[in-house]
Amino acid sequence: MASQYETEHSVFLCFRIVFSCFFIYHSFLSTTNLVLAQTPVYACDVANNPGLANFTFCNTSLDVKKRVHDLVKRLTLQEKIANLVNGAAGASRLGVPKYQWWSEALHGVSYVGPGVHFSNSLVPGATSFPQVLLTAASFNESLFEIIGKVVSTEARAMYNVGLAGLTYWSPNINIFRDPRWGRGHETPGEDPLLTSKYGASYVRGLQQRDDGDKDRLKVAACCKHYTAYDLDNWKGIQRYTFNALVTQQDLDDTFQPPFKSCVLDGNVASVMCSYNQVNGKPTCGDPDLLAGIIRGKWNLNGYIVTDCDSLDVIFYNQHYTKTAEETVALSLNAGLDLNCGTFLAKNTESAVNKGLVNESVIDRALSNNFATLMRLGFFDGDPRKQLYGNLGPKDVCTPENQELAREAARQGIVLLKNSVGSLPLSPPAIKSLAVIGPNAQATYTMLANYEGSPCKYVSPMQGLSASVSTVFQAGCSNVACGTAQVDDAKKTAAAADAVVLVMGSDQSIETESRDRVDITLPGQQSLLISEVANVSKGPVILVIMSGGGWDVQFAKDNPKITSILWVGFPGEAGGAALADVIFGLHNPSGRLPMTWYPQSYVEKVSMTDMNMRPNPATGYPGRTYRFYKGETVFSFGDGLSYSTFQHSLVQAPKVVSIPLEEGHVCRSAKCKSIDAVEQSCNNLGFNVHLRVKNMGNKSGTHTVLLFSSPPSVHNAPQKHLLDFQKLHLTAQTEGLVKFNVDVCKHLSIVDELGNRKVALGKHVLHVGNLKHSLTVRI
Ligand SMILES: *[C@@H]1O[C@H](CO)[C@@H](O)[C@H](O)[C@H]1NC(C)=O
Ligand SMILES: *[C@@H]1O[C@H](CO)[C@@H](O)[C@H](O)[C@H]1NC(C)=O
Ligand SMILES: *[C@@H]1O[C@H](CO)[C@@H](O)[C@H](O)[C@H]1NC(C)=O
Ligand SMILES: *[C@@H]1O[C@H](CO)[C@@H](O)[C@H](O)[C@H]1NC(C)=O
Ligand SMILES: *[C@@H]1O[C@H](CO)[C@@H](O)[C@H](O)[C@H]1NC(C)=O
Ligand SMILES: *[C@@H]1O[C@H](CO)[C@@H](O)[C@H](O)[C@H]1NC(C)=O
């Protein structure tokens, strides 16, 4: 129950540390019972205030641009400035109410951010989907979009009763480049393509309206944190002062593509700039990154917002600017539109007075902000009379939505090891189950961060107990597992037909402001696992509930540990989904969206080293499956099924020729690659058709990952994901998977200067063990 949870966890979120004192934002849990809002906040309430009807900005038959222009023109400088921050003042004399821009919906409507309130009497909870990394493991683009759609429906329903905003600062599409990062689980993983597809799909799910009106928004999403932000707090190095040194090649090849796709393919309404610096410049004050790329090259239709509060950080933590006014000028002139925090409200007027900022720049920022609200219908009068006006508390936590949370967890769960005769357990043979571990009774832990109050929980114990008689032992008092209670756990395990160990971490180990130092299981967890396995007489299932990956080589190697499952942070229905997989009601098809490295990796690699590519001169091994060649515990894309699937190639070319126009330099000179933007490249594609056969006796879904190893020019990745697809096959049947590969889009790589190139020569396509060589020539 949500109410139970609320009294148990008075959650305090510490967003940032400035001047060495804590700036603590208290989420609304303790006051939630006082929140009795019933009506939404909106402007242009013509029905109750007919005088507003004559304002052009309230005229719904005019285009957004005209309306915004009219509104901005009516405001005084002071009113304008008061609307540059997340707690926007509105303009009451014009019937524009205050608006709270900051709401969050990373994997469900969240109470992190002052725009959302849960209320026991109206909306006590919202559907809490798995944390993003687990959803990403499903490699199912339609799932990503459907979740976004359900979340935006619940968000609109809550907005209609005054409990939520219209602007959501989700998703987080940073690249999970290092397993220690405490926020890695908020992201779709380490691969730029998967991250791009996740971001664009989730954004579409949140934003797209059912009436197909592309100019208007259901809710507004925000892709964050732009850019190269993926260190929080590692050995005392803080994100607020971290200067990410990134090569142009890594920036354009790894860190920028998800943002580009979010803007161009997802049509996102906002981008958030990060706290950190990139190559010596704070991102929220870098005109090349903001006005140049997001606005200029990608043509963002929406607003650019700071993290909370990046401007404070630029001035007080980074000491990048000499005065507060310079900070204002730096950011607004660079293309920033909205400040999460109060910095712009406090310091913009004096910046204008000092001649550092022109009012026209403020007008531009405001126009981007107001245009977004207009597209959301905020200036169209009572939202209950518009599309989505009928949504209300009855549309939150519906049985269908809760079932989707369970389905998403099922689709994401990754089977990493399975000895013959282990999973799935069959209740007739397994009459008693020992359920052991500090996460066996997890409830709140399953949600991870940027959570909301869930509809309800199904813990692993509850899920497993529904099918078979279970005995529980915590084994450790918490996930830190200082001293394991080995003897009790062994006794329980020895007496049972099978053992499920639910281990891993929680937000005391992996969360915002908390990076790991080691990637071995915490405290005595490994000891407990090995000891329990040693005395067990039947299958031993190790379940790892966590954000990032771990060095669990000991468990992989131990024949007594018969299965290993990674369940991420599986959301409110995680325990039910786990039971579905363990008892074979669902045949797993999830694949790891990130590499699981050995502990030696983190001992060798500094978290601050942003280079993706290895450096033979220093022994630096590089990062992610695209560049790292060393040993792994588990690899990107790993994941088993209860069936086996066989691939065979049906169709793929052996040679692809790129036509070059007369006089092209590569017609006379020898070229290693050609530009991926040239005319010759347009619409040059080919098909790869594969036959997939389910060789097993169980129906199952198979995830087909199509990789390519390009020729080794321009420091190209050893391998990169071109595309992925899933197909469902009943036992002993086969199906066809068709990929359409665009030579310039999919096969291209990024060169040392950040330009997209198609390498000439041999590209090797891989699907599982199947390999096919393809020569690209001119
Ligand atoms: C709107 O403007 C017209 C013309 O200026 C005026 O006659 C009318 O009274 C105004 N309506 C309202 C509701 O103020
Ligand atoms: C709204 O704009 C339309 C189109 O210009 C105009 O015909 C109409 O009179 C306007 N409505 C009001 C109330 O001003
Ligand atoms: C992807 O997810 C959706 C939504 O749950 C589901 O309907 C669909 O079957 C999934 N696709 C595959 C191939 O499993
Ligand atoms: C303000 O605008 C004027 C006129 O366009 C321009 O000359 C001046 O440089 C601008 N000031 C700043 C701080 O951008
Ligand atoms: C496993 O148990 C046996 C006794 O049954 C013991 O000799 C052995 O040391 C144990 N191994 C581990 C790894 O605990
Ligand atoms: C499938 O079932 C048949 C008949 O029951 C059996 O002979 C065969 O070994 C099974 N195959 C697998 C892969 O389990």
Image (cartoon, grey):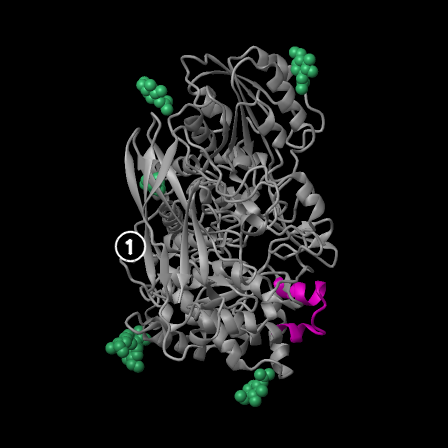
Up-down: is 551 above or below 718? above
Please tell me whether residue 322 belongs to the stretch shown in magenta.
yes
Residue at the image point whose x is 39% and y is 41% from the top: 703
Q: Is residue 729 left or right of residue 319?
A: left
Determine whether the residue tagged by mark 1 lies in a helix, strand or loop: loop
- Residue 434: where, in percent of width, then height? 54, 17
Frontmost residue, 75 versus 313: 313
Identity, as a three-letter code, of the amino acid under mark 1: Asp
Query: Does the stretch in magenta take in 281?
Result: no
Q: In the image, 50: left or right of 632?
A: left
Residue closest to the eye, 182 or 593 = 593
Residue 274 x/y as whole percent: 59, 61
Q: Would residue 546 appear left or right of 132 to someone viewing this image? A: right
Q: Residue furthest top?
A: 495
Say left or right for 448 vs 151.
right
Task: Report the front residue among 284 and 625.
Answer: 625
**Residue 350 drawn at (x, y percent):** 64, 78
Q: Main secondary structure of the magenta part?
A: helix
Pointer 1: what residue? 210
Q: Quadrant of residue 505?
A: top right
Q: Quadrant of ligand 5?
A: top right
Instruction: Report if the beta carbon of the residue with label 1 is closer than 8 angstroms to ligand 3.
Output: no
Crowding at dot 1, Cα within 10 Å, few <14 / some 14-19 / many 20+, comes out as few
Residue 329 in picture, x, y percent from top left: 61, 76
Visible residue check, residue 245? yes
The C terminus lies in quadrant: bottom left
**Which of 749/204 is in front?**
749
Bounds of the magenta span? 310-328
